[in-house]
Image (spheres, rainbow, N blue to C red):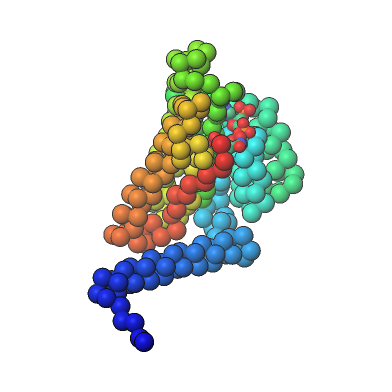
Amino acid sequence: MEYTLQPAERALFWVGALITASLALWLLYKIITGFRIWVLGNGDLLSPKLGKWAVVTGATDGIGKSYAEELARRGFSMMLISRSQEKLDDVAKSLESTYKVETKTIAVDYSHDDIYPKIEKGLAGLEIGVLVNNVGISYSYPEFFLHIPDLENFITTMINVNITSVCQMTRLVLPRMEARAKGVILNISSASGMFPVPLLTIYSSTKASVTSFFSDISGRNCFRKLFKVACIKQSKVKLVVPLF
Ligand SMILES: NC(=O)c1ccc[n+]([C@@H]2O[C@H](COP(=O)([O-])OP(=O)(O)OC[C@H]3O[C@@H](n4cnc5c(N)ncnc54)[C@H](OP(=O)(O)O)[C@@H]3O)[C@@H](O)[C@H]2O)c1
């Protein structure tokens, strides 16, 4: 005996079918994107065609140093920014000899907020294709908010290094990318910014701010995109979320 669906069942059937179809499309999109990025690579997309120079903050160690090496490998001239001039010179020398690229350095301490005129001067006249907002600090050990030693300075330092640097560096670089209609900005956030992390309260909230800044500023670019397609065509602000 044939069973015919009741109207309510038919509605639920179509809701289920739509949800399944959209999940399947989302999964397919993710697989294709993963294949494009991890198997095919992005080839010419991130190349000096975007602009001769790449700027990396916190470029002498960890993730920042790896970005500096990869961007130099792709042929970018490198502007390296960190605190210690000695470490900057070592990394610059190594990039120059390994990848035969031009390098420049700026030694500044991002925990201070009066450094931006010096950075602006150092960046003057450079055609910047990529900015990696990488510099960031975390706790030396997890601790409850009120138990952190020298809490007042700790707060100011972490906000200056993790948030102010991202906003100010973007302020210095984005207008020139917009004017040339080319450029990529990578903001290095953290998985700690995606969830409450009670023993890393200040770090976690500064990284949540980086994530929010990314959404807001890329939203602005998308908004402009609607009206000035040519202007912003190759301009991208991207968020990178390592763990912790
Ligand atoms: N490593 C992870 O597991 C992880 C996970 C999630 C997110 N992240 C994020 O990824 C980014 C890089 O982390 P990382 O672990 O690779 O860092 P890292 O190894 O500690 O390297 C820090 C870099 O930043 C520079 N730096 C530190 N304090 C500075 C200051 N006050 N002024 C100027 N430069 C300063 C250091 O240079 P000097 O030594 O010369 O000061 C060094 O080049 C950060 O934004 C971090 O929050 C990291």
Is any part of residue 165 visible from this angle? no
Q: Position of residue 135 (x, y in %)?
A: 54, 34
- Please state the quadrant of the image where ligand 1 appears: top right
The quadrant of the image that shows the C terminus is: top right
- Taking the spot 30% from the left edge, 72% from the top edge, the residue there is 9
Q: In the image, is residue 60 above or below residue 75?
A: above
Quarter residue 175 falls in: top left
Quarter residue 137 falls in: top right
Q: Position of residue 138 (x, y in %)?
A: 55, 28
- Taking the spot 67% from the left edge, 51% from the top edge, the residue there is 73
- Taking the spot 48% from the left edge, 31% from the top edge, the residue there is 197
Asked if residue 83 lies left or right of residue 148, the reply is right
Q: In the image, is residue 244 above or below residue 146?
A: below
Q: Position of residue 101 (x, y in %)?
A: 67, 47
- Taking the spot 41% from the left edge, 36% from the top edge, the residue there is 209
Q: Residue furthest front?
A: 1
Q: Residue furthest top?
A: 150
